[in-house]
Image (cartoon, rainbow, N blue to C red):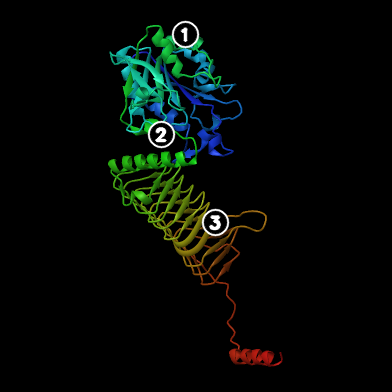
Amino acid sequence: MPAVNGPPVTALIMAAGQGTRMRSSLPKVLHPVCGRPMIAWPVTAAREAGVERVAVIVSPERNLSHALPDEVETVEQVESNGTGGAIRAAISIVRESARVLVLSGDVPLVSPEVIGGLIGAQEESGASATVMTAVLEDPGTYGRIVRGADGTVSKIVEAKAPGDATDRELAIKEVNSGTYVFDGPSLATALDDLSSDNAQGEYYLTDVIKIMRDRGELVTAHISDDPAINLGVNNRADLSVVETEARRRILRRHMLDGVTIVDPATTWIDAGVTIGKDTRIEPGTAIRGASEIGEEAVIGPHSTVIDSGIGSGCEVIHSYLNLCELADGCRVGPFAYLRPGAKLEDGAKAGTFVEVKNSTLGRGAKVPHLSYVGDAEVGEGSNLGAGTITANYDGKDKHRTVIGPGSKIGVDTMLVAPVEVGEGAWTGAGAVIRQNVPPGALAVSSGDQRNVDDYAERRAARETEGESSQ
């Protein structure tokens, strides 16, 4: 984490807006962006830029605390009265702070590097306020930065409605991003003088700039070339644009760190994922949550990994993994489903059409195909034949199956839990195992085969008679 030079900085993140254009029962800033709540993005960026104290300004009607990292404060903006009103709601924090960084909770992709550059620019200039700006070919309705002859900021002119700005001001291409660093005492004084005497009856943070300039204080601008500083979210279409850019950045970071992503256009990796070098991510793969993947693994094609740990050298092909753990050198799939609590130790295999739930496959154990392993312990080096089923549920309770090391479970074996198969034991094909199997024993349960002669001929005759009687 880069250190903040100069006086300490407090971050205030505005997140009290109602977000009605999202048309959602979920607060806007809680909508996920690449697996992380939108509000957590600016919080994380501020922390990574070296800001130690972070406070989020929230509406009293919507609780965001469960989505915020530890030690993040919240301040209620009781009245929805504009951006200036949001910062006024946190006036006690402003008065305690040497410098104040203002971010927006619905502009999630402002990076730590950009924040660090803005803080550094304010420290270097000693300005009462430094505004982060961008130069856009099509400035649209963004507020325009009007500079004086000396290059400092004279004012910020809104451009949302006809008449807000003159034609000359509208021709300006430098725009306000809504991100600022203020000298704390100067901001506190300006907030005391902020007025809501306007058509909307709201307090505008941009008016603080004019108040400071009228007092003869220095206001500067810091131009960023990162287009994400203006990528705000007002509706679901905006959210899609932001998430696309976030995903591009995440994939690029992994690739620069030594991960091969065969087709970025069909790969989704969440912000909290870690991946070791020389791992290969095949097309159609999604890696979600806080998943951790080791080195030299192959994930995909068409695999989904959610909040799971995958060791080095593993292969996960065409499979779905959720809340499970794979040690090094494991093989999964194709078409496997590893459910919560599945654990594969070094070199274990869960193969084609295998489902594993709340079970451990020991070192080198193999379940090659067409099996269900639920609530079970499979010992080291054991092999489960095709069609093996652990019958773990009796209609009321779940029970466990224990299969000892080196056991060989024959095809189409039904293990009715609770039951134990001893070390090195065998089961015959089609066995139904209801009692414990001693170590080294062979368990069979099939009855004698009986053949019914001429069955097909007699069945056909009965069917013919039935048709003729109709």
**Which comes sooner in the sequence, label 3 or label 2?**
2
Please indicate whether residue 106 sits to the left or right of residue 129 in the image. Answer: right
Classify residue 125 by image quadrant: top left
- The CA span between labels 2 and 1 is 30 Å
- Looking at this view, is 252 or 198 the one in front? 198
Classify residue 452 by image quadrant: bottom right
Please indicate whether residue 252 sits to the left or right of residue 437 in the image. Answer: left
For disc 1, the marked residue is 189
- Looking at this view, is 391 or 212 the one in front? 212
For the C terminus, which image quadrant? bottom right
Query: Circle 1 — which element?
Result: helix
In the rendered image of this protein, does residue 341 appear above or below residue 68? below
For disc 3, the marked residue is 374
Residue 242: x percent and y percent?
42, 38
Are there few (<14), some (14-19), or many (20+) residues within 10 Å of tag 2?
Answer: some
Residue type at the position of mark 2: Leu
Residue 317: x percent and y percent?
39, 57
Q: Are marks 3 and 2 in contact (CB under 8 Å)?
A: no
Residue 54: x percent and y percent?
46, 22
- Looking at this view, is 220 or 15 the one in front? 220
Query: Circle 3 — which element?
Result: strand
| Residue at 42% from the left image edge and 13% from the top image edge | 210
**Which comes sooner in the sequence, label 1 or label 3?**
1
In the rendered image of this protein, does residue 228 appear above or below residue 219? below
Residue 81: x percent and y percent?
55, 21
Residue lying at the far top of the rendered structure: 215
- The CA span between labels 1 and 3 is 65 Å
**Which comes sooner in the sequence, label 2 or label 1?**
1
Res 207 label? none
The answer to whether residue 222 shows anywhere in this view is yes
For the N terminus, which image quadrant? top left
Res 231 label? 2
